[in-house]
């Protein structure tokens, strides 16, 4: 083996080693992210005034927001590596979410797994999934309608609860849309 | 931003050391970037990445310059990102340069942008080093008739001049090692694999690198144009109505002969805003990066690449399950027209001699 061939071989091995080190670091980062988010929430304090909201408390929490979406969509990502989801729990969550929406004044709610014929454009989309990650996978949600939808990435949460709902609304209220202008 | 602050701090050191310090800093950054790029290339890389170049005006506000300079910084950043993607081995890069909705902006801004396009489109095909080195084809996606005639002409000329750009690899077998020489040609060269037993060499056609510039473009306009083409096909009896499905629609989009979109990236906002809506809705990672476009860099792109590599197997499995995402590379269907005089052989400095049997992709937990 000539020395240059040996050198390039060594180089290739070094790069493979470096790649594996990066991936191990990233896997650790992902594994600890949920703990970090939980710690942060404990430190910052709860967003909602109480955990078992009634229509009055929902209205109180949301009326000081500068804007509320008219149509809210929820997208549940399917992941092979994530924890298996129970359909019954999802239905319960959707029912609760529908109640929060009607109290907050959100007119339309779409949950992706139930298809509708006459779909209008959602203003806000909450994406939930199993493992926390930065990417969002739309998984065939009607593309025409999500042209201007604000997408909130809540991957890492399996259940939709009131805190998640309120946090997404807060995010939406701060957004400024220019529509190309 | 802290890296930029560090560099400006180094440059502000008031002595003749400042230039050496900044040079050392730049060299260190370059070396680190090349190491990381070479390491990432050992794993699976996406073939098609789309970028929304958003946040130029707000970046200009942030550093207290006018919006024109923000757009200029954005265009320079676009070229840097193209080079970064080509170095990483990404075949197709699609950028969102101008939306049909952007015509609603103030007239001065639109005029400035058109002037910028006028200069940039010709510069890209004539003087850009990345385009020349990687044999990149430049394509413009969108309705060019909406642009001023001279800008549209510059775009069409750039497409015409680069449409036959390609790059192919010659493999020479030296003992147990395969050495790769890269040839850049301006005509033909794609097609079936040729073997030459005398010199033990093989020509492997390489999927051409493509740079798609979406200007002026909206995804809804793309989908409606595809529908119109299909309707015309039905009227001419070339297509039967029962053959129309989502695969056929994909074949009539502007990105029909590009590989399926792997990563969709947007800086500074969390919306899709009419960019590659159809292509991004299935088997594609949508990544939102929290910075302005002129601040985007390899380090901000790295998490997206990591997540792509970690989920690569699942993505490929989902793709093979749905046939509509198979894009037939039409480039491989033409007969090769190799002409030795027209070929120029260049050995790039990153060539490595590798074993002929491919090394396994590193397994990641």
Image (cartoon, rainbow, N blue to C red):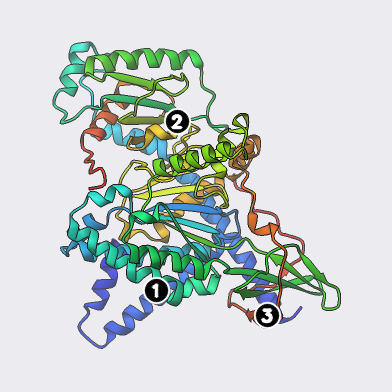
For the residues carrying marks 2 and 1, which lies nearer the camera in this image? 1
Can the viewer see residue B202 in this picture?
yes
Q: Chain of mark 3?
A: A
| Front of the two marks 3 and 1 | 1
Residue A64: give x, y in percent of width and height: 13, 26
Disc 3 from disc 1: Cα separation: 38 Å
Tell me, yes or no, if residue B96 can be seen here: no
Asked whether, in this view, residue A55 is left or right of residue B125, the answer is left
Relative to B16, residue B281 above or below: above
Q: Which residue is mark 3?
A: A4
Callout 2–callout 1 Cβ contact below 8 Å: no
Q: Depth check: give the residue in front, B210 or B104.
A: B104
Secondary structure beneath disc 2? Answer: loop
Between disc 2 and disc 3, whose residue precedes? 3
Residue labelled with disc 2: A142
Tell me the chain of label 2.
Answer: A
Nearest to the eye among marks 2 and 3: give it: 2
Q: Residue B103, percent across and down?
A: 26, 51
Crowd around label 2: few <14 · some 14–19 · many ≥20 (10 Å):
some
Q: Is residue B335 left or right of residue B68?
A: right
Q: Residue A83, labelled with which disc?
A: none
Q: Residues within 10 Å of mark 1 (few under 14, many from 20)?
A: few
Disc 1 marks which residue?
Answer: B123
Question: Distance of mark 2 from mark 1, alpha carbons?
Answer: 39 Å
Residue toward you, B301 or A15: B301
């Amino acid at each position: 083996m000539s020395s240059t061939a040996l050198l390039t071989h060594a180089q290739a091995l070094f790069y493979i080693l470096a790649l594996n080190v990066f991936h191990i670091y990233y896997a650790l980062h992902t594994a600890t992210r949920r703990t970090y988010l939980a710690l942060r929430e404990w430190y910052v304090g709860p967003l909602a005034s109480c955990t078992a909201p009634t229509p009055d408390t929902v209205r109180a929490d949301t009326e000081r927001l500068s804007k509320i979406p008219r149509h809210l969509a929820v997208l549940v990502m399917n992941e092979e590596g994530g924890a298996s989801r129970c359909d019954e729990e999802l239905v319960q969550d959707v029912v609760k979410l529908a109640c929060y929406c009607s109290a907050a004044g959100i007119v339309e709610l779409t949950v992706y797994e139930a298809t509708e014929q006459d779909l209008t454009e959602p203003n806000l989309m909450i994406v939930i999934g199993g493992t926390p990650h930065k990417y969002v996978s739309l998984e065939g949600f009607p593309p025409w309608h999500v042209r201007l939808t604000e997408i909130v990435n809540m991957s890492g949460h399996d259940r939709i609860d009131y805190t998640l709902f309120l946090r997404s609304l807060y995010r939406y209220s701060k957004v400024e849309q220019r529509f190309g202008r | 931003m802290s890296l930029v602050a560090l560099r400006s701090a180094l440059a502000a050191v008031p002595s003749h050391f400042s230039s050496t310090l900044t040079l050392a800093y730049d060299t260190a950054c370059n070396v680190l970037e090349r190491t990381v790029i070479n390491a990432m290339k050992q794993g699976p890389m996406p073939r098609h990445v789309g970028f929304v170049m958003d946040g130029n005006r707000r970046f200009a506000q942030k550093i207290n310059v006018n919006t024109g300079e923000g757009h200029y910084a954005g265009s320079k950043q676009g070229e840097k990102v193209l080079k970064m993607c080509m170095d990483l081995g990404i075949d197709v890069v699609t950028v969102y340069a101008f939306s049909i909705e952007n015509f609603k902006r103030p007239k001065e801004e639109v005029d400035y942008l058109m002037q910028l396009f006028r200069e940039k489109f010709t510069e890209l095909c004539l003087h850009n080093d990345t385009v020349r080195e990687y044999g990149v084809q430049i394509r413009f996606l969108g309705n060019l008739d909406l642009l001023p005639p001279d800008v549209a002409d510059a775009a069409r000329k750039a497409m015409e001049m680069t449409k036959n750009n390609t790059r192919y690899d010659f493999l020479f077998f030296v003992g147990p090692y395969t050495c790769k020489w890269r040839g850049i040609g301006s005509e033909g060269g794609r097609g079936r694999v040729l073997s030459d037993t005398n010199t033990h060499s093989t020509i492997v056609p390489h999927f051409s690198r493509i740079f798609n510039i979406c200007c002026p473009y909206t995804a809804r306009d793309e989908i409606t144009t595809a529908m119109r083409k299909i309707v015309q096909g039905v009227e001419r009896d070339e297509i039967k109505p029962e053959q129309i499905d989502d695969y056929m629609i994909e074949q009539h989009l502007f990105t029909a002969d590009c590989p399926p979109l792997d990563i969709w990236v947007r800086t500074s906002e969390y919306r899709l805003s009419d960019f590659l809506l159809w292509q991004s809705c299935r088997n594609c990672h949508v990544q939102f990066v929290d910075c302005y476009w002129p601040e985007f860099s390899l380090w901000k792109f790295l998490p997206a690449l990591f997540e792509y590599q970690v989920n690569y197997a699942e993505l490929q499995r989902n793709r093979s399950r749905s046939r509509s995402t198979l894009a037939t590379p039409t480039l491989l269907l033409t007969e090769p027209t190799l002409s030795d005089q027209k070929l120029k052989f260049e050995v790039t400095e990153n060539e490595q001699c590798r074993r002929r049997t491919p090394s396994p992709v590193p397994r990641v937990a």
